[in-house]
Image: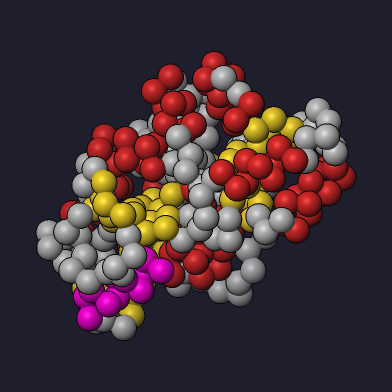
């Protein structure tokens, strides 16, 4: 690896895969005031903080530039992995390069899903709106994002957010209809995300294997941190997992017997608390 001094201990490297909204970022105001110091500590320790989010490439690129994170990240619920150029010596040939990142696509692009969603409009009248129906002002209003951030949120390449307005029964039918068309539908903090056959867990494994291959090691000690249902696939495949307490919903049910921790504090404060505990458990701080 060109520029990175990874922490290696007992022939193992340490990685953190983290969701953004409600975890690294506050659910309400999207701030990272309570996590930024811990992020800097991880950087000093040589532990990559890898964002694994339903957010777009544009959104995560902005955040990484702002906080000085130079590590790969995973976009749109596992649809693609973005790796800074020259970060890994060895990587798959099937990739596209632009704006100092290489992109490895793990799912089909958005156009197909837009057609699927549009075809369900008449069966579910008034039950949902998706990003393609919304103006910039609507998105700012629904998400609480400021203008630049809302524009970045609308630059989706692989998936379409849908806000559900109808009943729970209709919602289940809607999801089933999309699944029959091959879609993966996940519930995020605010929106249903409709995309291809991908999830945060498969993308985590893909990137974990790439780290292992590039560092000639067999064992990766990874921690996944999330708060919502769309985080479950990564919370179930990482060596250890943390659920962050949410002010807006209960803990989702994680299907694993051990290595699961639940934060006492909400959101970013819980994130910092649990990263500290993980560092102590592994004697890294
Ligand atoms: Mg979240």
Instruction: Please state, as top left, top right, bottom left or bottom right, where the C terminus lies in the image.
Output: bottom left
* Depth order, front residue of 66/117: 117
Q: Is residue 109 left or right of residue 6?
A: right
Q: Residue at x 36, y 69 (%)?
A: 208
Residue at image position (42%, 31%) is 152
Residue 9 visible in the current orientation: no
Q: Quadrant of residue 96?
A: bottom left
Residue 117, quarter of picture? top right
> Where is 17 relative to 208, above or below?
above
| Extreme residue toward the left, this view | 3
Percent x, y for residue 51?
39, 51
Expressed as whole percent of the image width and height from the top left, the position of residue 59 reads: 39, 36
Residue 127 in sight here: yes
Percent position of residue 94, x then y? 34, 65
Count of labels in the image: 0
Look at the picture and state if 279 lies above or below 246.
below
Membership of 103 in magenta stretch: no
Instruction: Give yes or no for residue 212 being in the magenta stretch.
Output: yes
Instruction: Tell me the magenta residue range.
Output: 206-216
Q: Main secondary structure of the magenta part?
A: helix
> Residue 224: x percent and y percent?
45, 61
> Farthest top residue?
137
Q: Nearer the viewer, residue 67 or 101?
A: 101
Point 64% across, 56% down: residue = 184
Residue at image position (26%, 60%) is 47
Give the quarter of the figure containing the N terminus: bottom left
Colour basis = secondary structure
Q: Is residue 270 left or right of residue 247?
A: left
């Amino acid at each position: 690896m060109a520029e990175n001094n990874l922490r290696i201990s007992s022939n193992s490297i340490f990685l953190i895969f983290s969701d953004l909204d409600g975890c690294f970022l506050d659910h309400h105001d999207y701030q990272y005031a309570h996590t930024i110091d811990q992020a800097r500590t991880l950087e000093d320790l040589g532990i990559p903080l890898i964002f694994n989010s339903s957010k777009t490439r544009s959104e995560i690129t902005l955040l990484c530039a702002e906080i000085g994170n130079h590590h790969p990240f995973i976009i749109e619920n596992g649809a693609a992995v973005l790796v800074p150029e020259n970060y890994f010596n060895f990587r798959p040939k099937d990739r596209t390069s632009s704006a100092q990142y290489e992109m490895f696509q793990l799912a089909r692009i958005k156009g197909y899903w837009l057609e699927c969603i549009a075809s369900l409009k008449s069966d579910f009248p008034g039950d949902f709106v998706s990003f393609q129906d919304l103006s910039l002002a609507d998105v700012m209003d629904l998400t609480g994002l400021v203008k630049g951030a809302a524009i970045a949120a609308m630059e989706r390449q692989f998936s379409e957010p849908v806000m559900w307005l109808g009943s729970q029964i209709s919602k289940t039918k809607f999801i089933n209809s999309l699944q029959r068309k091959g879609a993966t539908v996940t519930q995020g903090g605010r929106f249903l995300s409709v995309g291809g056959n991908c999830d945060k867990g498969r993308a985590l494994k893909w990137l974990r294997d790439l780290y292992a291959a590039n560092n000639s090691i067999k064992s990766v000690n990874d921690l996944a941190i999330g708060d919502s249902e769309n985080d479950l696939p990564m919370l179930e495949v990482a060596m250890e997992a943390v659920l962050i307490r949410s002010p807006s919903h209960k803990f989702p049910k994680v299907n694993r017997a051990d290595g699961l921790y639940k934060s006492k504090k909400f959101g970013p404060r819980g994130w910092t608390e649990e990263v500290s505990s993980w560092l102590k458990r592994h004697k890294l701080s």
